[in-house]
Image (spheres, helix red, strand yellow):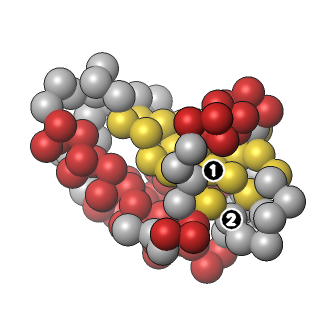
Amino acid sequence: MLAARNRLRKPYEIARVYKRGVYGSAGGYLSVKAAASGRSESRAVVVVGKKVDKRAVVRNRIRRQLASGLRELWATVPTGYDIVISVHSDIRSLPTAQTRQLLQEALRRARVLAV
């Protein structure tokens, strides 16, 4: 889990990122929207809808898996961004390394990472 100050929580803030953010996707599994926020720290949220799986246990497992990958990449994320990571299909069967690679690719395509 990210630190509380690095989590995007309010629905209107998430809606703002969806409306104004730069889009980046990876392999059809997930996508990223990132918008400059002007804050001193970046914030992020992982969104897993019921289309992925109806069971909350499964959705939370996917959310935790991606949050862990994001935490490892967090040092490379520049400050001042609000980031929404949306999951489009079940990624539980993918290896952890591939999941992190997909996350990194989506962040790069959304112009958040320069790596």
Contact (Cβ within 8 Å) of mark 2 with mark 1: yes
Question: Mark 2: which secondary structure?
Answer: loop
Farthest-out residue, top = 51
Q: Residue at x 48, y 37 (%)?
A: 86
Decide which of tag 2 and tag 1 comes sooner along the chain: 2
User: Residue 90 location in percent, x, y?
Assistant: 26, 34
The quadrant holding residue 38 is bottom right
The location of residue 62, given as percent across then percent down, is 27, 48
Q: Residue 42 — which label?
A: 2
The quadrant of the rendering that contains the N terminus is bottom left
- Residue 43 horizontal side relative to residue 113, left or right: left
Going 21% across and 27% down the picture, which residue do you hit? 53
Which x, y percent locates residue 96?
29, 61
Above or below for 77 versus 58: below
Residue 76 visible in this rendered orientation of the protein: yes
Q: Which residue is mark 1?
A: 83
106 lies above or below 113: above
